[in-house]
Image (cartoon, rainbow, N blue to C red):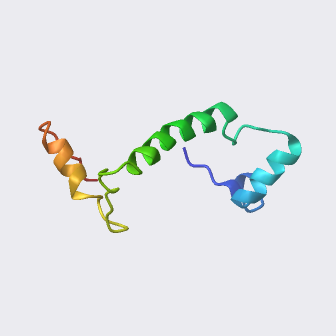
Amino acid sequence: MDFRYGTAFAVPPPEAYERLLLDVMLGDPTLFTRTDEVESAWRFITAILDAWQQPGAPPPVTYAAGSWGPVEADELLKADGVKWRRL
């Protein structure tokens, strides 16, 4: 499909926040996350954050921005005989 917003509507597309603000004013929740989803995500993340606060917990693994991620991710997959597919 070859869709170009400017060609179809003869105006440039709105900026992301312009679109969200318009949706708020129109009462359109389509692009917004539901409350139960946000609460579920926070329950999941809070458990991880709490575990990192425990004595002796390993620190979060870090890696360089723009890299393929931490070496530990490769090692985790290698243990099961699989690897990331590089694009």
Q: Is residue 22 left or right of residue 63?
A: right
- Of 42 and 7, which appears nearest the observer? 42
- Of 66 and 45, which appears nearest the observer? 45
Where residue 7 sits: x, y (%)? 70, 57
Residue at the top extreme, as displayed: 36
Where residue 39 sits: x, y (%)? 62, 36
- Of 25 and 53, which appears nearest the observer? 53
Q: Quadrant of residue 48?
A: top left
**At 35% across and 56% down in the image, what residue appears?**
60
Please state, as top left, top right, bottom left or bottom right, where the N terminus lies in the image: top right
**At 33% across and 68% down in the image, what residue appears?**
64
Where residue 67 sits: x, y (%)? 31, 65
Q: How many marks?
A: 0
**At 83% across and 51% down in the image, what residue appears?**
22
Q: In the figure, 66 relative to 70: above or below?
A: below
Residue at the front extreme, as displayed: 55
Q: Quadrant of residue 30?
A: top right
Q: In the figure, 46 relative to 69: above or below?
A: above
**At 57% across and 33% down in the image, what residue appears?**
40
Q: Is residue 16 left or right of residue 62?
A: right
Q: In the figure, 9 relative to 31: above or below?
A: below
Where residue 44 sits: x, y (%)? 49, 37
Q: Is residue 56 left or right of residue 41?
A: left
